Image (cartoon, rainbow, N blue to C red):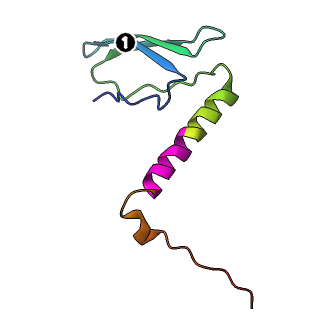
Amino acid sequence: MPRHDWPPTSLITLINRTQTSPKGTESRIVVYRPVGENIVYVSGACRLTASGYYSSVAVHNPAALFAGLFKDALAQARHRRNRPDAGDRLKYREVTTA
């Protein structure tokens, strides 16, 4: 089943134009990102029995992507910390010197 939650940020847009091809045909996948944009186009065909496809693509302004993902991770951590049951796991202890 395809993941609809990737990428985990609004800074990258993934346009999936791939199709499933019949068993016994060759898989051909093309990944393209225009210069200066964070839109990734994936097109081509992947046979029904293919084990998967992996590729790497550079992003435009990687520092902004990192900052955005880090900000989202901090917000998610704050959300988890503020849950009613979080107090049981998060105990603050006073540090004393000997």
Magenta span of residues: 72-81
Residue 45 location, x and y as percent?
36, 11
Residue 58 location, x and y as percent?
63, 22
From the viewer's perspective, tell me whether residue 59 is left or right of residue 6.
right
Q: Residue at x 43, y 54 (%)?
A: 80
Q: Residues within 10 Å of mark 1 (few under 14, many from 20)?
A: some
* SS under mark 1: strand
- Which quarter of the rendered picture does the C terminus lie within? bottom right
Label 1 belongs to which residue? 18
Q: Residue at x 28, y 15 (%)?
A: 24
Q: Residue furthest right?
A: 98
Quick check: 16 above or below 69? Answer: above
Residue nearest the observer in this picture, 78 or 40: 78
From the viewer's perspective, tell me whether residue 54 is left or right of residue 36.
left
Amino acid type shown at disc 1? Thr
Residue 10 location, x and y as percent?
50, 24
From the viewer's perspective, tell me whether residue 59 is left or right of residue 41.
right
Quick check: 15 above or below 92? Answer: above
Q: Is residue 75 magenta?
A: yes
